[in-house]
Amino acid sequence: MSGAGRSTAANVLEDHGWYVVDNLPPQLIPAMGVLASQARDEGRADLRIAAVVDVRARPFSGELRDGLAAIREHGWRPQLMFLDATDEALVRRFESVRRPHPLQGDGRLLDGIQAERALLGDLRAEAQVVIDTSGLNVHQLGRKLTPIVGVIGGPSLRLAVMSFGFKYGVPLDADFVFDMRFLPNPFWVPELRPLTGVDEAVAQWVMGQEGAVPFVDRVVDLMTPVTEGYLREGRRYATVAVGCTGGKHRSVAVAEALASRLTGDRVATFVVHRDLGRE
C-alpha cells in the first residue's frame, strides 16, 4: 500500500546486500530475471534481487503476475512481500507529508486508499509475507524486517512471535491470534504492575497461573504440523500473535515462552513486542 513503508523496506534490503530496483514496471520483471540468470551463470550464486512495485505502474495486477510467472520459468523462486497499514495510519502519513494519494484523483484521500485496496486485494492474499506497519516507525520497521531478509541459508522458516494489546487493535499481519486474557492480570499485583513480561518476576508469575503451561504446550503441538506444512509448501515467514489487554504483561511473557519452544533446526523464531512501552 502507498504510504505503508516501501522505501524503508527497500533501504533495509540494500543494507543487507540485496540489489534493489525501485518503481520497476511489472512488464520489465522478465528482463530483470534474464539478467539475474546471466549473473548466476557467471558465478553470482548469492545474488539476491528485490523489485519494488506499486500502483503507479498500471495496469498493475495482471502484469505483475505475468512477470512473476516469467521469472519462475528461469528457475527463480520469487517471494512476494506486501506492506500494509490501517486506513487511519495511511491517512495520517499522507497528511503529515501533505501529498495526495496516487489514486486519489479529484476525490478524497480515503477514496484513493480504498481504490488501492480493491486493486491490490488479490495480491495481498497471495503474498508469502504480509507486514503491518501501522504502529511502527521507520526504525521499528527496519528491526522487524531484518530477521526476514538479512540471512542467506539457515532455517527455512522464520516465525515471528508477536505480543500485542487488544486495546490497540489486532495486528493485520497475524497468521494466528491467541488471547491471553483468560489468565489473571499481573496489573492488579502492586509489586508487578510497573514491571513487564520480560522481567523474570512477571514471567514466573504468569507461567505459574493455572492453564498457562498447558496452553503453551497445546500451541506448540498445534504449530508442529503447521510449520511442517509451511516448509513443504515453501512458505518462509509467518506470524503468531499473542494478545492481552495492554500488551505489557501476560502476552509478553507467553510470547517469550512460545518463541523458545517453537525454535528448531528448520524454524527460527524471533520475538516482537509491538505495544511494550506504549502505555
Image: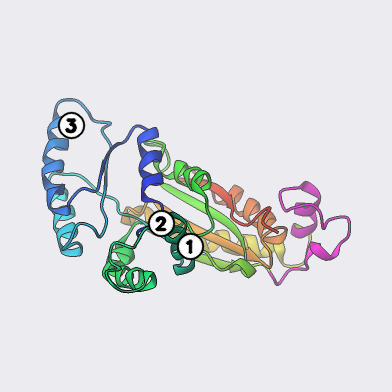
As measured in the structure, the alpha-carbon distance from the residue carrying label 2 to the one carrying label 3 is 32 Å
Mark positioned earlier in the residue sequence (2 or 3): 2
- Return the residue at label 1: 92
Q: Position of residue 219 (x, y in %)?
A: 57, 62
The residue under the point 59% across, 55% down is: 274
Looking at the rendered structure, the secondary structure element under dot 2 is loop
Q: Residue drawn 56% across and 58% down?
A: 220
In the rendered image, which quarter contains the N terminus? bottom left
Q: Which residue is mark 3?
A: 40
- Range shown magenta: 181-206
Q: CA distance from mark 1 to mark 3?
A: 43 Å
Residue in the picture at 27% in, 56% down: 54
Q: Nearer the viewer, residue 192 or 161?
A: 192
- Whether 202 is among the magenta residues is yes
Q: Is residue 266 visible to us here?
A: no
User: What amino acid is labelled 2 in the image?
Assistant: Ala
> Helix, strand or loop at disc 3?
helix
Is 37 placed above or below 238 here?
above
Q: Are marks 1 and 3 in contact (CB under 8 Å)?
A: no
Magenta span: predominant SS is loop
> Residue 268: x and y, percent?
49, 45
Could you tell whether 247 is left or right of 268 in the image? right
Disc assigned to residue 4: 2
Q: Amino acid at mark 1?
A: Arg
The correct choice, above or below, for 156 with respect to 252 in the image is above
Q: How is the image coloured?
A: rainbow
Q: Quadrant of residue 276?
A: bottom right
Left or right relative to 25: residue 217: right
